[in-house]
């Protein structure tokens, strides 16, 4: 990693900032590009004085030229609340942003990893999901700007690979959580923890029987770095924790760990909310020798500690 120059788009976001930390720690020279839509300077403040770290405010929809060896393309709002705020911009970020990064990778001969998502499987009819599954995505729904944007980003990656021999990697990230999620992020983990710590009602959408599988951020960062640095395998590869939980059981667990007085309230299920989601990670185990190490209870404790600190500020 030493002497490698690495670009992280979306580097001031939740996952991106953990990735920047790890890359700097490993001796890489890291350039973070972010438009600070959902990311924040606070996430990278501790890196600002580091000699190997630099941040630039830049919107990925606009081209940029920098000399780098590797590009992690993470820029894109990931929470439904934020990606649906300006859906056209979300599509632009995934499509034009990925074209800009692929053009850059082609020009400077960098390796590029695309942060794809389990959302490419939509509301899956195959369970658990394998990389060979083509998905079940509504192309005209409220989630489409994100899901279809990410699917086109995968298409672009493959076409630049086939047409221009760009050195690509595709990682399909499943629900990931941890410290530095924004309080206003809107995804289930931060919502439940913040609600529990404030003794506010816990908002379970639908009846809470829908499932998700939650990966702790440091495990995900390990997976992303292993994928970027492996040879002879471009993916796509699923990265996620294969333990599956219902949203209702997550609410109960958060209440138990925080010893909260919160009650669970049930509100309508958003449109096209996937019923179940769980990664088959056989390929990541085989090709990357990777699997998550941190279980939900342990990851939750650490994330709750973080939010406790933020709420006390
Ligand atoms: P996040 O919203 O915290 O981070 C996204 C970052 O991208 C933010 O810093 C935001 O300001 C930046 N950004 C958004 N649009 C931009 C643009 N046009 N130009 C420049 N920067 C822009 O979300 P996250 O959870 O850290 O997700 C990071 C990446 O991982 C995203 O691409 C997301 O789709 C993918 N992913 C995350 C999860 C998860 O559960 N965390 C799951 C699947 C995929
Ligand atoms: N969810 C919920 N309450 C919330 C936020 C989310 O019940 O306050 C549910 C949501 O309907 C979905 C699951 O939790 O079934 C995960 O939602 P999130 O937005 O975190 O991610 P995604 O749906 O994109 O996996």
Image: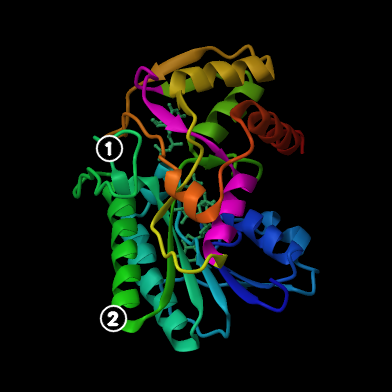
Task: Indicate which quadrant contains ligand 2.
Answer: top left
Residue 35 visible here = no
Residue 225 in the image, given as x and y percentages of width and height: 59, 60
The quadrant in which residue 259 appears is top right
Disc 1 Cβ-to-ligand 2 distance below 8 Å:
no
Q: Which image quarter is the N terminus in?
A: bottom right
Residue 221 in the image, given as x and y percentages of width and height: 60, 53
Q: Which disc is residue 163 wearing?
A: 2
Indicate whether 188 appears above or below 97.
above
Residue 220 in the image, given as x and y percentages of width and height: 57, 48
Image point (27%, 34%), residue name: 271
Q: Residues within 10 Å of mark 1 (few under 14, many from 20)?
A: many
Image point (72%, 66%), residue name: 24
Q: Earlier in the sequence, mark 2 or mark 1?
A: 1
In the image, 279 versus 151, the foreground residue is 279
Residue 194 visible here = yes
Highlighted magenta segment, given as a residue range: 205-228
Decide whether residue 225 is among the magenta residues. yes
Q: Left or right of 7: which side holds 271?
A: left
Q: Which residue is mark 1?
A: 124
Image point (56%, 43%), residue name: 291
> Which residue is the extreme one toward the front?
286
In the image, 61 versus 157, the foreground residue is 157
Q: Which circle, 2 or 1, is nearer the viewer?
A: 2
């Amino acid at each position: 990693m030493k002497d490698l120059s690495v670009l992280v788009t979306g580097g001031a976001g939740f996952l991106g900032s953990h990735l920047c930390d790890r890359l700097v720690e490993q001796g890489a020279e890291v350039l973070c590009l972010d438009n600070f839509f959902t990311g924040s300077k606070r996430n990278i403040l501790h890196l600002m004085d580091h000699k190997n770290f630099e941040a630039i405010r830049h919107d990925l929809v606009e081209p940029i030229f920098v000399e780098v060896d590797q590009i992690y393309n993470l820029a894109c709002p990931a929470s439904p609340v934020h990606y649906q705020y300006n859906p056209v911009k979300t599509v632009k970020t995934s499509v034009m942003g990925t074209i800009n990064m692929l053009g850059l990778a082609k020009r400077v001969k960098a390796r590029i990893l695309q942060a794809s998502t389990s959302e490419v499987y939509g509301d899956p009819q195959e369970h658990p999901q394998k990389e060979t599954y083509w998905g079940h995505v509504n192309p005209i729904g409220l989630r489409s700007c994100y899901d279809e944007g990410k699917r086109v980003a995968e298409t672009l990656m493959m076409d630049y690979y086939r047409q221009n021999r760009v050195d690509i990697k595709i990682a399909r990230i499943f629900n990931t959580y941890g410290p530095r999620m924004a309080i206003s992020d809107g995804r289930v983990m931060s919502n439940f923890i913040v609600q529990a710590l404030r003794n506010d009602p816990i908002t379970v959408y639908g009846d809470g029987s829908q499932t998700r599988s939650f990966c702790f951020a440091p495990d995900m960062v390990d997976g992303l770095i292993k994928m970027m640095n492996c040879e002879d395998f471009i993916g796509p590869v699923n990265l996620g924790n294969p333990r599956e939980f219902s949203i209702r059981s997550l609410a109960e667990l958060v209440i138990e760990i925080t010893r909260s007085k919160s009650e669970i309230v049930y509100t309508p299920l958003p449109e096209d909310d996937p019923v179940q989601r769980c990664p088959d990670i056989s390929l990541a185990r085989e090709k990357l020798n990777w699997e998550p190490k941190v279980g939900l209870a342990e990851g939750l404790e650490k994330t709750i500690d973080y939010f406790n600190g933020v709420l006390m500020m």
